Image (cartoon, rainbow, N blue to C red):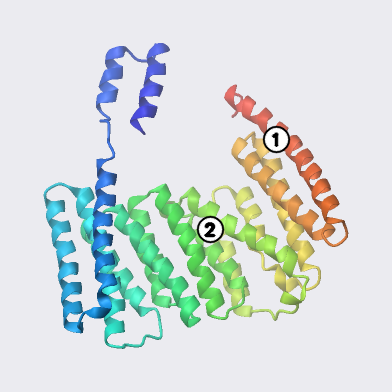
Amino acid sequence: MKRSLLEKEAASWVEEGIISREQYEQIIKRYPNRNSRGLLTIFGGLFIGLGFLTFVASNWSFMPNILKMGILIVSLLGFYFFGERAYQRGSKALGTSFYAIGVLLFGESMILTGQMYHYMSYSATTFFLWGVAALLVYMARREQPLLYLTFAILTVGQIYSWMTYGEAHLGIFLLFVMGGGFELVRLRRDFLALLYGFGYVLQSLVLVFAGGHDYVWLLFLWLLLYVASNLSIFRFPSLQITSIGAAFLLKAIEVFLLDSWVMERWDVNVTFLIVHIVLTGLLVLLVKDRTIGVLNLLLFLPIVYVGGNAGVIALVLLYVLSVGYLIIGTKRESIGLVNFGTGAFLVSTLIAYVQLAWDFLNKSVFFFIGGILLFGLSYVLNRERRRLSGYEKGGGFR
């Protein structure tokens, strides 16, 4: 908890007689006021490193190769040396910044060395090795900024592989999933789970589309993430939200594309169906809240195999999901479920309105009627949400 928030809350406890003034002082002393020196040190170190690299880059073409290699090696060892020295002296923020510069310089050194000696690469193996090095540096010091940097390198490397070589790098994907997943289980940080979930979605997009696979495999990979998020060691709300949000967005896209020429005919992929059914059964066994779990499964149904009117079915599933959350949330008097259901219902209505009315109405009339419709729905749904919120504050929940 932040010190400022703690001071505010503790002061209200004193006024209400929950704690005494002496207890207030003792509580505040346990949380020293942290300044921004650590953050400023990291940014200061990064800017110094970037300034040095910019100077070298501006004069790079005038240097002989032997001098270039010497600069790269000395710079790399120098940043790691000063990072280790600062870390051993207790300045972890400064040491971490030097380590981060060293990691960035390692990747740049591989790229520049390849350019110097005209080495041609036909895959993103450079980013894979860069990610391995970044992960090793992180494991040596266990500082979370280094782990975030590793995530960024692996994610950018996978996207680069797709954009440049038209393929997904399996090593990068496995290193991200296994290495990042292990650290997520060990650290158990919600923000790290959010980054991991977002990166996993991007990695899976590249893996499926760059590999030329049917898009339905995205449903399998995202369902796999959702199943994993129901395991006790991997249970993070951020992962569930990420997987459900990605599947919801895909269902919204299906509403517009499944009935068009873009996805006209699809052959049934037997392998996909078998593993998908097995994974679905596993989810039903693992999930604690069976009702919510089965409701979320609607987003992972491969309705593309239904054939005709699959887009309409996708829209119906979105409505069933949103209405289901509203009903369950109202019945359980859960403001969180009602909020999710409200948002999903409004988005589903907007999708349905665009799909049905875009080609038939004048555009000004389209937006005018759409705005009135959404305002009306928002008023009705938010009134129910406020009612439940007020009831919750009044202590009426079970």
In this view, the residue in front, 335 or 212, is 212
Q: Is residue 168 at least partly visible in the picture?
A: no
- Give the residue displayed 53% in from the left and 80% down from the top: 211
* Residue 254 in picture, x, y percent from top left: 70, 66
- Give the residue displayed 26% in from the left and 76% down from the top: 60
Q: Nearer the viewer, mark 1 or mark 2?
A: 1
- Give the residue displayed 43% in from the left and 58% down from the top: 196
Which quarter of the image is occupied by the N terminus?
A: top left
Quadrant for residue 280, please give it. Answer: bottom right
* Residue 311 in picture, x, y percent from top left: 76, 65
In this view, the residue in front, 114 or 391, is 114
In this view, the residue in front, 354 or 282, is 354
Q: How many labels does the image show?
A: 2
- The residue that disc 2 covers is 226
- Give the residue displayed 27% in from the left and 36% down from the top: 35
* Residue 169 in picture, x, y percent from top left: 43, 77
* Residue 27 in picture, x, y percent from top left: 29, 23
- The residue that disc 1 covers is 382
Left or right: 13, with 134 as reference point: right
Left or right: 136, with 120 as reference point: left
Left or right: 260, with 121 as reference point: right
Q: Is residue 130 at least partly visible in the picture?
A: yes
Q: What element carries label 1?
A: helix
